[in-house]
Image (cartoon, rainbow, N blue to C red):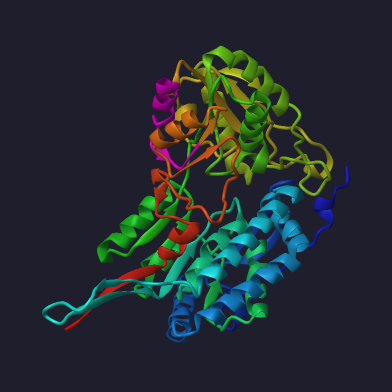
Amino acid sequence: MTTAVADLTRPDVHLHIGAERLAEGSAGTFDHVNPASGKSDKTIPMAGPDEVDRAVAAAAEAFESWKRTAPAERARLLHRLADLIAANTEKFGRLGAMDNGTPLGTVASLTEKSIAWTRYYAGWADKITAEVTSTLTADGEFGYTLRQPYGVVGIIITWNGPLISLAMKIPPAVAAGNTVVVKPSELTPFSAELFADLVVEAGFPPGVINILPGDAASGAALVEHPQVKKVSFTGGPATASKILAACAPTMKPAVLELGGKSANIVFEDADLQAACGFGTIMSVGAMAGQGCAFPTRMLVHESIYEQVVATVKAIAEQIVVGDPFAEGTFAGPVVNQAAFERIQGVIAKAKEDGARLVTGGEPARLDGELAGGFFLQPTVFADVDPQSDLAQNEVFGPVLAITPFRDEAHAIEIANGTRYGLSGYVHTKDLKRGLRVAEELITGEVLINGAANLAVNRPFGGLGLSGLGKEGGKAGIEEFLFTKGIGIA
C-alpha cells in the first residue's frame, strides 16, 4: 500500500540563535524516525552546551532593548506572528503529522488553539499593571509596585504538541518583556523549524526568540546557565525533579507542566451518550492518548456501570487508527518504539492485576508503508482497582481505566487518590452537584459536561506530580513577571 507518508519531504532543521540559522550543532545529529512507518526520515542537527551558551548570550543582549520596547510594539509583533501561523495552518498540519504522527485534523485544531494563545497574550502586552500600596503617610512615604520581566527564560517543551507547547510558553514570556531560549524535543523538530522562520518573518528583533533542538544534555545546560533567570518546562516528573535540583542552588524559579491521571466522574443522571463519547475519544482516541490532561480514569456510578462500559466499548471500536495523512483517520501512532513497548507492558500488567479487558490490548496491524509503524488499538479496561498500577500511573497512550463508585463521596475519594492533580472531569445534569464536586477535587482545573481543554483565558496547571505554576489566563503572564515594591520617603 502506498501512502502519503512516504511522499512528503521533511524540511531541513536548523539552530536559530540570534540572527543566525545554523545547519550544524556541536552535539552531532539525531535521526528522526517517522512513527507511522518506523523508519528514519531526516537527520537533524543537535545543539550542545556551546550553542546553548551562544543562544543565552544572544537573548541576554536582546533583553536590554526588548524590555524597553513599547508594549504596543510587542503586541503588534505577536499579532503578526499569529497572522503568519494562521496563514500557514495547512503547512503546520503536515509538519505536525510528520513530527509525531498526529492526524491532520487534530493538528488543525491545535493550530487554531495556538493562534488563539498567541493573540491572547498579544492582548496582555500593554495591560500589565501594578498597584499603589500606600498613599502619603504622616512620615511622608508613598509606596507602589512594579511588575518586571525576569530576563532570559529557558523553555523546554515535550513532543506531544510541538506547536501548541510553543504557543503556550513563548507569547506570554515575550509579551511580558522577557527574551527566550527554547529547546524543542528532538522527536518533533519540524513544527519548531517553521515557527522559528515565522518569528523572523514577523519582525522580532534577533535574539528575542532563539530556538535550538537538542538532547537532555543541552536541556541541562540551559537550565543551569547562570544568565537564565527562570525555567518553563513541559514533560515528565522524572525530568522535572532534575530541573528542580538544578535550580535549587540559586533558587531559580520554574514553571513545570507535567503529567496527570485525571478522573472523569460520570454520575447516574449524566447525558450518557455525551459523557461516554467525550470520555472515550479524549482518552483512547485523540492524539493516541498522548496528552497530560486527558481523562484516563473513568469513574462510573454503579447503577449505570455496565451500560457505560458497553457504550464505551462500542465507541472505542469505531475509532479509526491509521495513516495520519489519510482522510478519516482519528488516531495515529504513538511517538516511538520505546513508547510502543512501554504501553504494551502497561497493558500486560493490567491483565495480570485482574482488570477486565473490554476491547483492544494489541498492536493495530497495518500494511504497506505503515506496517512498521507504532500503532496501538484503543484499549479499555473495566473493573480497575483504584490502587492498581493502571489507576495510579500515567500511561501516555490509548488506554482507559473504568472503575465503579457507590456515591458522591466515594467518587471524590477515588478521584483524589493519586499523586497527580492536573485535571478533573464531571458529568451530571445537577449543576449544584457538579460545582460541589469541582470544589472538592484536588486538581488545577475541573471541566464539567464536556468543557474544552486548553482554553487560553483559563489558568492551566496542576498540583503534586502534575507540576508547579500556571499557563493560560492572567496567571500565565504573571508567571513571567516578578513584583518589585518601591517606597518613596
Where is residue 295 drawn, in percent x and y? 55, 35
> Residue at 55% of width from left, 33% of height from top?
296
Q: Magenta span has 273? A: no
> Residue at 53% of width from left, 44% of height from top?
292
Note whether residue 124 is visible: yes
Where 334 sits versus 305, above or below?
below
Where is residue 23 drawn, in percent x and y? 64, 75
The residue nearer to you, when weighing 372 against 309, is: 309
Q: Which residue extends farthest left?
A: 139
Left or right? Give the position of 5 relative to 177.
right
Where is residue 275 drawn, in percent x and y? 62, 29
**Quadrant (top left/top right/bottom left/bottom right) for the N terminus:** top right
- The answer to which quarter of the image holds residue 199 is bottom right
Where is residue 185 drawn, in percent x and y? 56, 58
> Residue at 54% of width from left, 74% of height from top?
210
Note whether residue 40 is visible: no
The boundaries of the magenta stretch are 408-424
Left or right? Give the position of 174 relative to 84.
left
**Quadrant (top left/top right/bottom left/bottom right) for the C terminus:** bottom left
Where 312 sits versus 167, above or below?
above
The residue nearer to you, when weighing 329 against 127, is: 127
Where 445 sits versus 94, above or below?
above
The residue nearer to you, when weighing 105 against 394, is: 105
Where 344 sits versus 144, above or below?
above
Number of marks in the rendered image: 0
Left or right? Give the position of 204 relative to 106.
left
- The answer to which quarter of the image holds residue 310 is top right
- The answer to which quarter of the image holds residue 146 is bottom left
> Residue at 39% of width from left, 72% of height from top?
228
